[in-house]
């Protein structure tokens, strides 16, 4: 009985830890502000400033290869040797990638 309770508590604790680690990967700190997935470009620019580089990547394709949403990548940094690459699709932040500068 006690062993079962301990294993359930351990499982709940590990699950909570994994969920919080995933949430941290979906945010970027800009000074004292946080940028999160789903933010709009003007919100990101207000919090982080003008990006070092903006690159229009292409478009998402819908049915019949019709262009639907513009895909754009913004680059910030380097900060502590890391570049932050933010990907926007249809004016929403969809991905935050951190990459070591070469």
Image (cartoon, rainbow, N blue to C red):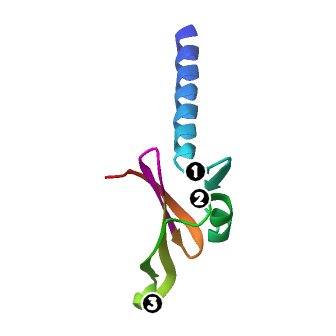
For label 2, count other residues whose C-alpha is less than 10 Å away and answer few (under 14), some (14-19) or many (20+): some
Magenta region includes residue 73: no
Separation of disc 3 and disc 2 at Cα?
A: 25 Å
Nearer to us in this view, 57 or 47: 47
Q: Residue at x 56, y 44 (%)?
A: 24
Residue position marked by numbered label 3 in the rendering? 66
- Image quarter for residue 60? bottom left
Instruction: Report crowding for label 3: few under 14, some 14 to 19, many 20 or more residues within 10 A (C-alpha).
Output: few
Q: Which residue is mark 1?
A: 27
Look at the numbered discs 1 and 2 and tell me whether their residues touch, using CB distance below 8 Å: yes
Q: Is residue 90 visible?
A: yes
* Residue reaching furthest to the top: 2
- Image coords of residue 72 (percent x, y): 48, 74
Q: Secondary structure at mark 3?
A: loop
How crowded pointer 1 is (Cα within 10 Å; few <14, some 14-19, many 20+) is rated as: some
Magenta extent: 77-87
Residue beneath label 2, please? 37
């Amino acid at each position: 009985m006690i062993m079962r309770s301990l294993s359930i508590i351990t499982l709940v604790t590990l699950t909570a830890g994994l969920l919080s680690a995933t949430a941290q990967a979906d945010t970027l700190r800009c000074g004292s502000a946080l940028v999160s997935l789903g933010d709009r470009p003007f919100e990101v620019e207000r919090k982080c400033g003008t990006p070092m580089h903006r690159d229009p990547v292409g478009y998402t394709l819908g049915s019949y290869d019709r262009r639907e949403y513009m895909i754009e990548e913004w680059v910030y940094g380097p900060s502590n040797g890391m570049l932050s690459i933010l990907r926007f699709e249809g004016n929403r932040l969809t991905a935050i990638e951190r990459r070591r500068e070469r």
